[in-house]
Image (cartoon, rainbow, N blue to C red):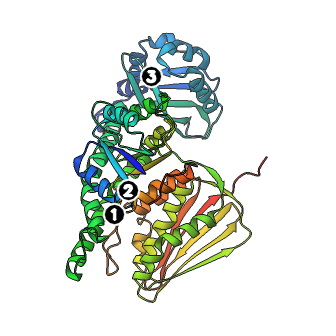
Amino acid sequence: MSARNPKTGPPRATLADAEVLRAVLDSASTPAFALDNEQRVFFVNRALADLLRIAPEVLLGKSIAELVDLMGTGLPDPAAYRARLESLAADSEKISVAQWDYNTDARLTFKELSQPIRLSDGSVLGRLFHYFDITREKELDQTKSEFISIASHELRTPMTSIKGSLDLLLGGFAGEVNDETRELLVIAHSGCERLIRLINDILDLSKIEAGKMQLRLHRMNLVDSVQRSVRTVKSYADSLNVKLEVEVAEPLPEICGDKDRLDQVVTNLLGNAIKFSPPEGTVTVSVKAVEDGVECRVIDTGPGIPADQVDRIFDKFHQVVGPSKKKGGTGLGLTIARALVVEHNGRIWAESQLGRGSQFNFTIPAAPPEA
Amino acid sequence: MKVLLAEDEEDIQRLATLGLRKRKDWQVVLAADGEECLAMARSEHPDVILLDVMMPNLDGFATCEQLKADAATRDIPVIFLTASAQEREEQRGLAKGAIGYLRKPFDPLQLPQQVLDLLARAGNNPASSG
């Protein structure tokens, strides 16, 4: 069955050692099975048989339909699972990752990894399905989302008291304030606003990571989002003496978008561009039609991003390290912007040259023609 | 304009009241929870109700539902004013029949105008814009 070489010690398995391979796969604690090219089960490991509480010999030779029937009420959606297995079994190339739920005494969640079983000559023997239990991770994710939601609510309430009081004082409610007092109140107010942005960003990110971001999609023109966002950041740009320019190349196709979320994306990109622009600098936002939809570019004349950081600029809590570092961001804005663009089936990317400025671009697919 | 503010946090009651009363002829009556809000909606006949969500006894969503189920209060416009910031909560609030959903923190001095804008958008004619 296996050859023991006295010089090298332990026995080495060869391809012919089916029994050894079966023992190896049986020893794995992660459930697995394999289908042959006739789409019948030709291998089941011990972990899967234990999970299903069905003897391996009962499962062997079964078709996909029979396998799904045997899993019975354990499957929350047997039809969907059967369709996925059939589609993958007919595909000799695809490597697929999916979520698979199975009810035993409790509902378990698995990550299903499926890939063709390929021999050394390239021929395909069948397809392997391998299941990794992620139930605990899912529970932790849920707990994290709930914690963030509660923390967000609980932080907002005292923030309302602090910011509301500052708003009233700054609004002259308690009488005129002198310049020194006003300066201190403005500092406190801006700290509050930064904290609120952080709370909002953490809440958004938590939703995105939990796959719970709900877009309210309507047919719209991206230019409207750009114009609203320009109005939003205008006073900020003025305060830093940065000029804003808008270039629109008509005609533009409509897109299917969530107006508030796209405003958030453009406002974030513009806010960053203004923040990193020198006084007298210019931020240009341009919108034009491209092959796959509409493209928006936000171009600044700031210090640029070091080449080794351009790809990481969209990562969570990443802030550019170097002489250009400026305070005031949450480190989440670009992560959220990217996630929102991706939710719209769009693309977002950055280009930058040190000393010459940066350009943030995103595209949103055109809406399908109206019926 | 008579505003019924249902809010359990005293600080926030005070701040909102200060902001709302900056408008001439605006009157604010306070309820500390959902049940009190229901009773005062019937007795005080407010022009608009500002409703917190997380309150003792009866939360804002349940309060809104009951306001809309009662012929005596169903026509009073309801606006949520809440720290429950998630979109699904906003959708839930609007589905209960509210005309608007304002998130905390809010600027007390902007609050009257936000209320007027929401009333105008919903087609209500405020008794007085102050």
User: Which amino acid type is marked by label 3?
Assistant: Tyr
Task: Return the x and y of residue B76 as percentages of the image width and height.
Answer: 48, 40
Which residue is drawn at the image coordinates 58% and 70% (left, top)?
Answer: A227
Task: Return the x and y of residue A122 as percentages of the image width and height.
Answer: 60, 41
Which residue is drawn at the image coordinates 29% and 60% (left, top)?
Answer: A164
Is A348 positioned to the left or the right of A240 in the image?
Answer: right
Q: Which residue is mark 1?
A: A330
Q: Quadrant of the N terminus of chain A?
A: top left
Q: Is residue B78 above or below residue A47?
A: below
Quadrant location of residue B44? top left
First reached walking from the N terminus: tag 1 or tag 3: 3
Is A143 positioned to the left or the right of A76 in the image?
Answer: left
Which residue is drawn at the image coordinates 43% and 79% (left, top)?
Answer: A304
Which residue of the protein is positioned furthest toward the bottom in this rendering? A280
Task: Return the x and y of residue A195 as percentages of the image width and height.
Answer: 29, 61
Near-viewer residue (B7 or A8): B7
User: Which amino acid type is marked by label 1?
Assistant: Thr
Q: Which residue is mark 2?
A: A201
Q: Residues within 10 Å of mark 2 (few under 14, many from 20)?
A: some
For the residues marked 2 and 3, what is the alpha-carbon distance in whole angstroms?
A: 34 Å
Which chain is indicated by disc 1? A
User: Which element carries disc 1, helix, strand or loop?
Assistant: loop
User: Which amino acid type is marked by label 2?
Assistant: Asp
Which residue is drawn at the image coordinates 65% and 23% (left, top)?
Answer: A38
